[in-house]
Image (cartoon, helix red, strand yellow):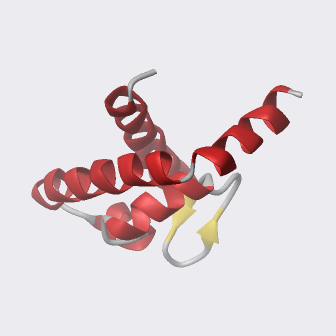
Amino acid sequence: MAFEDEAEIAWSETMMSILRQYNPDTGWCGEQLLPDAEAAAQAAGGVRFLWGASHWELAWAKQKFLRAYRDEIQIQPARRSGRDEIASG
């Protein structure tokens, strides 16, 4: 899968998880983000910011998220392949 496609999917899944499973008052309820998505979310302003961001703010945050996610998956191939082996094994 191309980095761009994977990053777009990660953005959608991250936002869905934040909106369904995160509350700034109580924290996470359910599974938290995977490390790559967590790092990208932090680069985009953090989970709390993304949870309450306006549509306009999300447009800019998405660009930051995508850039950080692509950088993360390009820099950390060994960590990712190990995680993929665990998930499939």
Where does the image place residue 72, in percent across and percent down from the top left? Answer: 46, 54
Does residue 63 sit above or below 26 in this rendering?
above
**Is residue 86 left or right of 2 when viewed as pictured?**
right
Count of all numbered marks drawn on residues in the image:
0
Name which residue lies at 56% across and 52% down: 76
The C terminus lies in which quarter of the figure? top right
Viewer-proximal residue among 39 and 30: 39
User: Image check: 77 left or right of 41?
Assistant: right
Question: Seen from this angle, which residue lies furthest bottom?
Answer: 25
* x 45%, y 39%: residue: 10
Q: Which residue appears farthest toward the right when viewing the image?
A: 89
Q: Residue at x 67, y 50 (%)?
A: 79
89 to 79, vertically: above or below = above
Does residue 89 appear left or right of residue 63 in this picture?
Answer: right
> Residue 59: where, in percent of width, then height?
15, 51
Q: Is residue 23 left or right of residue 5?
A: right
> Which is more toward the observer, 53 or 72?
72
Q: Position of residue 17 (x, y in %)?
A: 52, 47
Tell which of 73 and 55 is nearer to you.
Answer: 73
Say if 34 sits above or below 49 in the image: above
Q: Residue at x 37, y 62 (%)?
A: 51
Q: Residue furthest left?
A: 56
